[in-house]
Amino acid sequence: MTKFEALGLDKSLLDAVSDMGFETPSEVQEKAIPILLESETDLVALAQTGTGKTAAFGFPLIQKIDGNSRTTQGLILSPTRELCLQITNELQLYSKYEKNISVVAIYGGASITEQARQIKRGAQIVVATPGRMKDMIGRGLVDITKIDYCVLDEADEMLNMGFFEDIQDILSNTPNEKSTWLFSATMPKEVSIIAKKFMHSPQEITVGAKNSGASTVQHEYYVVSGRDRYPALKRLADTNPDIFSVIFCRTKRDTQKVAEKLIEDGYNAGALHGDLSQNQRDLVMNAFRKKQIQMLVATDVAARGIDVDDITHVINYQLPDEIETYTHRSGRTGRAGKSGISMVIVTRSELRKIKAIEKKIKQEFLQKNIPTGMEICEIQLYHLANKIKDTKINNDVDSYLPAINDVLQGIDREELIKKIVSVEFTRFYNYYNKTKDLNTSPDRSSDSGKSDTSFNSNGSVRYFINVGEKDGYDWMSLKDFIRDTVGLGKEDVYKVDVKESFSFFNTEAEVTEQILSTFTEFKVDGRFVNVEISKNPGGGGGGGNRRGKSFRDKGKRKKGPRNEDRGRGKGRDRGNSKNPNSGKRRSKKRKGDFF
Ligand code: ADP
Ligand code: MG
């Protein structure tokens, strides 16, 4: 096995390597470092996330930089602020025994004057996001006209994020005779264009098959009906009690929604997306790094910078549009030689995407079933038994033992075990006891979702809600409002009957809990929106799924309080209808401005 010594690195760098605990170079390091040290060449290196690309360009770059000159000699472009900071941090560690090397990060969302000041003090290496870099060039705050090396890190992602033109502009400010090193997990067309346009007969290295996922990652998919995504996610989490995962959603809104639901359901979850402030994002990431957050729900862009080892599962709550994005997602797990699982929750209609991904990553997916409620109970039971077995005894309880023994007197060992285990188990049992099977057979041709409920159904429940026509709803907009607020599927709310100041609707009994808890202490524009189970189970009425009578003849769909304007005091007249059915209000607190 090659050691770092054999790669041609100076002593000061080898000392840093050993301080970092790196023993053997990764494949990309082994291939790239000698090439970059020995020659002045352009390089295209394709390697998955988590394969150690930072060190592959970082060590040669530091070795080649002249610490005695204050001129900026190396520029590293990377797609996100987080990544920028990570690279800067790593390079500072690599160069800790090189007295005079200064690495400065420049990125958006932070003071440009402060960054300019750091540059002015002399930064041989600048690590930048394209947007901020362009900005600083434009204002004359940074000079990259004398650089010898330019690294494009995560080139595919930078292009995905629309930085093509910025990169082009930035490169046009650099000398022609520099060396360009391009690192990327994948090689889509846009990356080859950049390579062709800005590089001179680059050497190429590829680690593993082109575009293939890290082989330490197992890929699995679960077929469910669209509106069962969330319960399926919960079951996957409950099946893996020690899960430490990133859950990918397609939109910021879904990301926020799924995270909030998980938190409400008692999981250690957090959201990471672009609508959060920099500060909020830092807080979430710190909590995740410290494993206070077990399930990080994230958008692709926000998760791009995550460099956290030990992630056990990547869960694709929804599949991405681009296959390449899947590679990035699954690359968040199975890092640094550890194994990981990438799970995909899909509907039948998306199955062909799985096939396309398999082709791309040259790895097969395992089709697995969402565990049934009872399977989860069993898993939790064993998990609990093991936890008890492995728990370190706290001897400070000794003094209380006599009293505890008094309390537990007369209970034999078997009964005691049953009781201890039941403390936790009953919680899961009560939740999962009567739940349905979430799996959808992948070969059934229709995906109506309806058949899933009528099968195994606990029956329909009719509700009363204290908003109506006066509040600007017709049956369609009210149905949308309920569905979106609760996070239900298209077919889940039916028989919606809108009266002047209140309305009725139906759902299957399975989601009753979800409906009632969502509309507890729930406010729209400062007013409580109350939902209760209707005393009248009849559930006739207009609307519903069929475009029946109801208010349809009023013509076009009226605008209900959709998510984007809820809770922002838009001042729509919401009437003042009193809830004729007012009764107990459940006590659970809930934010009015959900999502
Ligand atoms: P990439 O840029 O390819 O996604 P990184 O450079 O971020 O990967 O490295 C991933 C992780 O592996 C980091 O935690 C890094 O410190 C670690 N790492 C890199 N090279 C080695 C090595 N040779 N031995 C052990 N760990 C390494
Ligand atoms: Mg990297």
Image: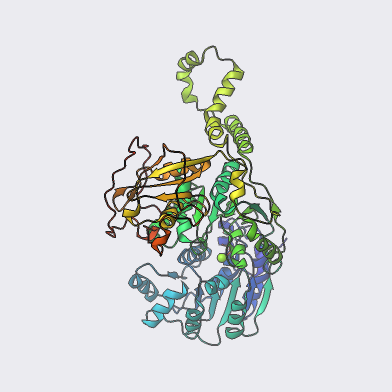
Tell me: 48 left or right of 119.
right
| Relative image position of residue 14 (x, y in whole percent) | 59, 63
Report the coloring of the rendering: rainbow
Please give the name of the residue rendered at 47% of the width and 83% of the height, measured from the top-left corner. Answer: 169
Numbered label tally: 0
Tell me: 438 left or right of 582.
right
In the rendered image, the quadrant that contains the N terminus is bottom right
Residue 483's place in the image compared with 140, above or below, is: above
Tell me: 46 left or right of 553.
right
| Relative image position of residue 456 (x, y in whole percent) | 61, 40
In the rendered image, the quadrant that contains the C terminus is bottom left
Q: Quadrant of residue 414?
A: top right
| Relative image position of residue 158 (x, y in whole percent) | 52, 72
Please give the name of the residue rendered at 50% of the width and 43% of the height, measured from the top-left corner. Answer: 511
Q: Mark yes or no: residue 366 visible.
A: yes
| Relative image position of residue 96 (x, y in whole percent) | 50, 63
Q: Mark yes or no: residue 25 visible.
A: no
Please give the name of the residue rendered at 46% of the width and 78% of the height, measured from the top-left corner. Answer: 72
Q: Quadrant of residue 152?
A: bottom right
User: Is residue 592 or residue 210 the one in the foreground?
Assistant: 592
Residue 318's place in the image compared with 193, above or below, is: above
Instruction: Tell which residue pokes out farthest to the bottom in this image.
Output: 176
Residue 113's place in the image compared with 251, above or below, is: below
Picture quadrant of ligand 2: bottom right
User: Is residue 149 or residue 455 the one in the foreground?
Assistant: 455
